[in-house]
Image (cartoon, rainbow, N blue to C red):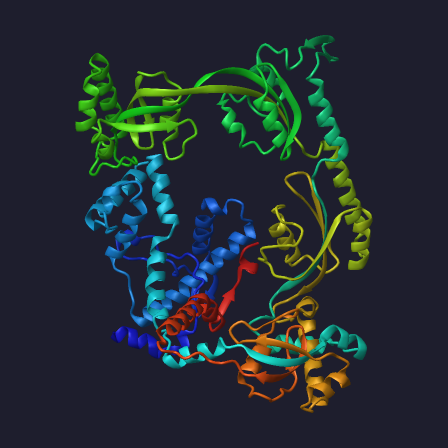
Amino acid sequence: MALLGDIRKRSWLLILGIGLPLFAFIVGDAFSQGSIFGDPNELGSVAGTPINIQDYNLAYNRLSKNPQMQEASENVLSEMAWNQLVSEVLVTNQMEELGIGVDENKYFEEAGRFYSSVNPNLTDANGRVNIELTKQFVSELKTAALAGNPQAQNFYEQWENANPQFRLLNRTYLGLVSSGGLATDVDAAFMNKANANNDIEYIVVNYEDYAQKNKIEVTDDEILGYMKDHPKNFKAEPSVNLAYAYFPGVASEQDNNKILNELNSYLAPQVIKDEVNGISDTIRSFAQAVNDSAYVSRFSESQFDPTYYTKAQFESFPDEGLKEKLKNANKGDVIGPTKIGSVYNLIKISDVKAITDSAKTSHILIGYAGSEARGAGITRTPQEAQAMADSLLTVIKADPSKFNELARTVSDDAVAAQSNGDIGWVGRFQQGFAGSYRDFAVTEPKGTIDVVPSQFGFHIIRIDDVKQVTGYQLATIQKQIKASEETQENLFSSANNLALNAQDQSANDFINAARQENAEVNNADGVTRFATNLVGLGGTRKEADILRWAFNDDTKPGAVSTFETLDGGQIVAYLSNKYEDGKYNIAAARTQVEAKVRNRKIAQKLASENTEADLNSLASKLGVTKQTASINYSRPMIEGAGLEPNVGGVALGLAEGKTSGAIQGNAGVYFVKVTKKGAVAEMDDASVLRRSVQTQNRSLIQNSLIPSLVDASDVKDNRIKKLK
């Protein structure tokens, strides 16, 4: 309680909230990942604490290995890694100042929950973690990973990349800080009052109409003044203004027709001539082909798929017409060409036969140290496990009746052992089974017994029963719909000509010329070096390259450069302006600031010129119509205008019968009269509303802690200089 009191006293820290990215915290040997902030090779600093390049690279690489980040661009990863490290410093400093730490048992509680899907014995029926058993499990897993076991390495790396140390520190920190977000009966009473609807009469002067009639303009000095008045939103940092033309690497109509013509040629016999060797080769039609696998290998851009599909699985195909054709097709029939996504397909029913749709199996599992076997205390090596499994197979084949006994007494699958190794039914495409186990189960006949390896160890599998359905093997000739070399050459020529002609031209000249070339043209003003998005270039993965060029010291305003995308597309970038550190980019800010400055000027002008309290006379003077509405503070919505929180606030505080002055709203400038104050419900029990306010307070704390800490700290980001 003393610690909690200490935290609450630091109220200037508590209105801050969280968007904590990942970060590493060291606790004993289990947390040993090297020094985080001590390297002198600084990439930047936070509140005087250095961040070095090695830490940045570690954070960047960890993020890049996250499966969910595989499609993330270089700049997205860079921003996330940097923000992660900034958060690490800020939170670590706060925790040290408050004297808060995380003990080792908390770490292993987290590990137990993480690995419980692999080893259910790590938690009991109530979800409590067995700390000692988890320590042993993690130790064995780590030992196997260091010894080179690929499964152990993969699973242990998933654990490390999940940054459990951060989650623990984050949870502790958030719990303590957000516990200060309390609410009182006074807060509950205010919320109760804020929910009451107040009837109002009002007039509103639309900003756009007033600005046009009165020629309200906004100067650069006014834009600059607004930026300086809002330093949290506008920083005098290095930025560039860009224009760019994008020539997407997509197939032309001619490319599309060429692909279709080629696929259609396989519907009839054809003679292919080898002009070099002076020989001809007669090719059967696809329907008449004897060896479909060889035919597909020769003419398709994808490999022959030997899988047999059921009619039920045809339902998952995206093309409705294709579904029906497949359902009614017979062996030898050819369907298509049909387009699925960005691929044209010519499909032949290559074979039809009875297949195993699902199999009932039993197994004996022999795990090894580092495998995902669920048995506790497994120390045998993979070689020892395989030798043991092979030995048991020999015994079982000599006397199949011994299978059940061995399944009960030897298997490392304690759950299946209770029912003689019975696993139940496994479907051909069922998830949750090891792939090798499932494939064996649905391809072998009933009664088969053999050893099959998986990430869990070595399985001695017995096929107890099978269910069969009709399966259809599809031989498919596929052609990717993509820009041909000729099309790519044309794109390169258009981009190159644009780049050459744009030298020493203005940005407007560049944009006009790009449009004449039928390029997709965009502007991006106020772009920082590690911006994560350039409008219109999503998916090209060229944003980082373009910004690296634009921020290069040798690149001056008026410079032009071309960039080729992976699909043969072309981007021509034009640097309009460049702003060094300490310079405000007024041109970039104008698009988001101009309307705000203009609206404020209009509100101030109307306030000074209209002080009378009669809405009818004001409406007549300003040429608008008086309207009515009912509005409350909690959800200040006006029909036809949308959310108007300023109006809702004024209506809450204004006495019945009183008229307000000018209110700067979202849709325009309002003048409001309260005609009837809303009835406030009696509160027999304030606890419900009090809890609601408290939840809001804690959510606010959690969502704004790190941004507020960053705003209050001296953060030096030298990535522009250090990361070329």
Q: Is residue 252 left or right of residue 532?
A: right
What is the x, y in percent for residue 564?
67, 43
* Residue located at (43% from left, 29% from top): 429
The quarter of the picture where residue 604 lies is: bottom right
Q: Is residue 310 left or right of residue 604?
A: left
The quarter of the picture where residue 466 lies is: top left
Query: Foreground: 496 or 249?
Result: 249
How many numbered circles does the render carry? Answer: 0
Query: Foreground: 629 or 495?
Result: 629
* Residue located at (56% from left, 31% from top): 317
What is the x, y in percent for residue 181?
38, 73
Residue 223, relative to residue 353: is it above or below?
A: below
* Residue located at (68% from left, 38% from top): 568
Residue 509, relative to residue 562: is it above or below?
A: below
Q: Is residue 301 visible?
A: no
The quarter of the picture where residue 462 lies is: top left
What is the x, y in percent for residue 46?
45, 67
Q: Is residue 109 left or right of residue 14?
A: left
**Position of the N terminus by quadrant:** bottom left
* Residue located at (30% from left, 45% from top): 115
Q: Is residue 353 visible?
A: yes
What is the x, y in percent for residue 393?
24, 18
**Position of the C terminus by quadrant:** bottom right
